Amino acid sequence: MKNLQIKVAVITGAASGFGRELAIACAGEGMSLALTDIDEKNLQGTVELLPPGTPVLAMKCDVAKADQVEQLAVATYERFGASHLLFNNAGVLVGGPLWTATTQDWEWMLGINVMGVAHGIRSFVPRMLQQKDECHIVNTSSVAGLLSVPGGGIYCATKHAVVTMSECLDQELRAEQASIGVSVLCPAFVPTGIADAARNRPAELGEANPLNAGFEEQTRKATQAGKISASDIARITLDAVKEGRFYILPHQKIKGAIETRMRDILDERSPTRTAP
Ligand SMILES: NC(=O)c1ccc[n+]([C@@H]2O[C@H](COP(=O)([O-])OP(=O)(O)OC[C@H]3O[C@@H](n4cnc5c(N)ncnc54)[C@H](O)[C@@H]3O)[C@@H](O)[C@H]2O)c1
């Protein structure tokens, strides 16, 4: 999708981090925006950062809830009559050894990181297919979708799911000869709010296991030390959309670890330890 001007971008998790920067970058391309997040206050903060006059629909939505994502699609088509670029971006993280994870930890992360993407695909792809315009979907995974990181068991499980869902979706759409491109975004550590994801954890899912505070602190340090910024990620992602590139790996140095994992599999040897 070379020309983004006057097209409509839908961005989940738009109140912070990548989502906020994608909104700013898409507005800079002259796009109309449907922005959503569970955090209404900071979503409004994103709207205030957009160039004046940007057509924007900002709507609270929990991506883990199918009916709320469907309402987002209905509202987007009511307001703009179309959607062209969908970023299934909202995501959360809680860590620690798998045997310390609670069922609520699983429910929370699977609900947002996996089902959030599934709901986005279910609500928007059929509408995009009917539209017959050129469209594109970007699913935010992570290098955790290509690696197995100790302490990140649930997160890796969800992000691996997003990689394979994207790979399947891309092949399915090409088999249909649909004019809908797909990309999967797989960054390493970037300074955003991800280490403090628990700030938006629903009360009914209880607090994160305190045993996992060490992992959270490690993630905070690693993301804060990230050299590539969220706005760099947004720029790299839009470039990939324009080039029609499927895999987006903004951190080149991590490719060595991915290659090692692939080699471990092909050589049928035990996983090489990946630094968290
Ligand atoms: N920052 C990193 O180092 C990094 C690296 C790889 C992948 N990612 C992925 O990037 C994506 C964006 O995260 P980020 O780093 O910008 O973090 P962030 O915490 O800054 O932003 C995530 C946004 O998602 C929103 N969100 C949380 N639960 C939601 C829900 N149920 N419904 C709707 N929105 C919800 C949050 O309110 C927040 O605004 C995530 O999928 C994350 O897993 C981040």
Image (tube, grey):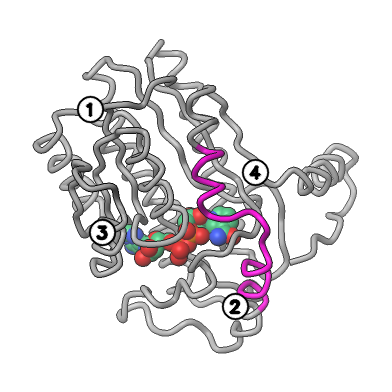
Task: Indicate the position of residue 141 as horizontal and vertical percent values.
Answer: 54, 48
Name the kind of residue labelled 3 in the image. Answer: Glu
Q: Which secondary structure is most common in the magenta stretch?
A: helix
- 4 or 1: mark nearer the eye: 4
Of mark 3 and mark 1, the one earlier in the sequence is 3
Of mark 4 and mark 1, the one earlier in the sequence is 1
Name the kind of residue labelled 4 in the image. Answer: Pro
Of mark 4 and mark 2, the one earlier in the sequence is 2
Specify the label residue 48 is tagged with: 3
Q: Is residue 78 left or right of residue 172?
A: left
Whether residue 160 is visible, yes or no, is yes
Q: In the structure shown, which secondary structural element does the residue marked by tag 1 occupy?
A: helix
List the residue tagged with mark 2: 216
List the residue tagged with mark 1: 127
Magenta part of the protein: which range? Answer: 218-237
Q: Identify which residue is drawn at 48% across, 29% down.
A: 241
Q: CA distance from mark 4 to mark 3?
A: 28 Å
Name the kind of residue labelled 2 in the image. Answer: Glu
List the residue tagged with mark 4: 250
- Asked if the residue under mark 3 is in contact with the one under mark 4, i.e. CB atoms within 8 Å, the reply is no
Q: Identify which residue is drawn at 41% across, 10% down.
A: 177
The answer to whether residue 88 is above or below residue 92 is above
Task: Indicate the position of residue 91 as horizontal and vertical percent values.
Answer: 45, 58
Q: Identify which residue is drawn at 49% across, 45% down.
A: 234
Disc 1: residue Cβ within 8 A of ligand 1's nearest atom = no
